Amino acid sequence: MPPDDEELVGQLIRLIDVRLLDPLEILVDGDQAIDSLRPVVQERARSWATTMVSGDDRAAYGVIARVISTLYPGDGPFAPPLDWWRTPLGQAVARRVGHPTAESVSYAVAGAMLGITRQGVHDLTSRGRLARHPEGGVRSAAVRDRLRREGTRRA
């Protein structure tokens, strides 16, 4: 598994520990059964990361949707902080689906997803290199497509 994938696996394991297993362990007063889940989580995180990075689009979207809805529950739309897009999970999501719940994203979010400044996004849209959304911002799919093209050129 490439180093980037290992970073994604590590982030998934840490998130599941912090957001799910640790609180459950506190709730059930340190029950040993929680410890038996940790190896399962490690194995599954590796499988999820592989699917997110190199699985077919439908499988990747399915895993991403399950991970996002489980680890980032809420009543409102999914709106992670800008720094989240620079994490291994954020980059995997951006490359595979764009923004998972938004058809358009702000220039700031597009910049975070692409690893460039808001001004850089403005320049790309002005030159027709990144599609604007008719209602404002940038098309999420355009950001995803640009990341995919850049990834292909680097390989």
Image: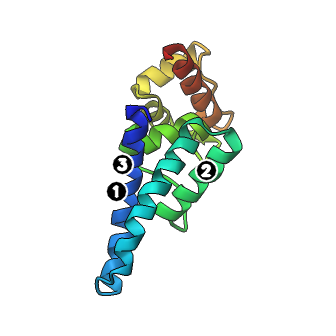
Residue located beneath label 2 in the image: 101
How many angstroms separate mark 1 from mark 3 (CA)? 6 Å
Name which residue lies at 57% across and 50% down: 64
Label 2 or label 3, whichever comes before in sequence order:
3
Of marks 1 and 2, the one in the foreground: 1
Residue 82 seen anywhere in this rendered image of the structure = no
Query: Hey, which quadrant is residue 111 in on the image?
Result: top left
Q: Give the quarter of the figure containing the N terminus.
A: top left
Helix or strand or loop: what does disc 1 sit on?
Answer: helix
Residue located beneath label 1 in the image: 14
Residue 154 seen anywhere in this rendered image of the structure = yes
Residue located beneath label 3 in the image: 10
Name which residue lies at 34% across and 56% down: 14
Q: Are marks 1 and 3 in contact (CB under 8 Å)?
A: yes
Name which residue lies at 62% across and 39% down: 55
Give coordinates of residue 87: x percent, y percent: 38, 41
Give the answer, above or below, for where 116 lies relative to 24. above
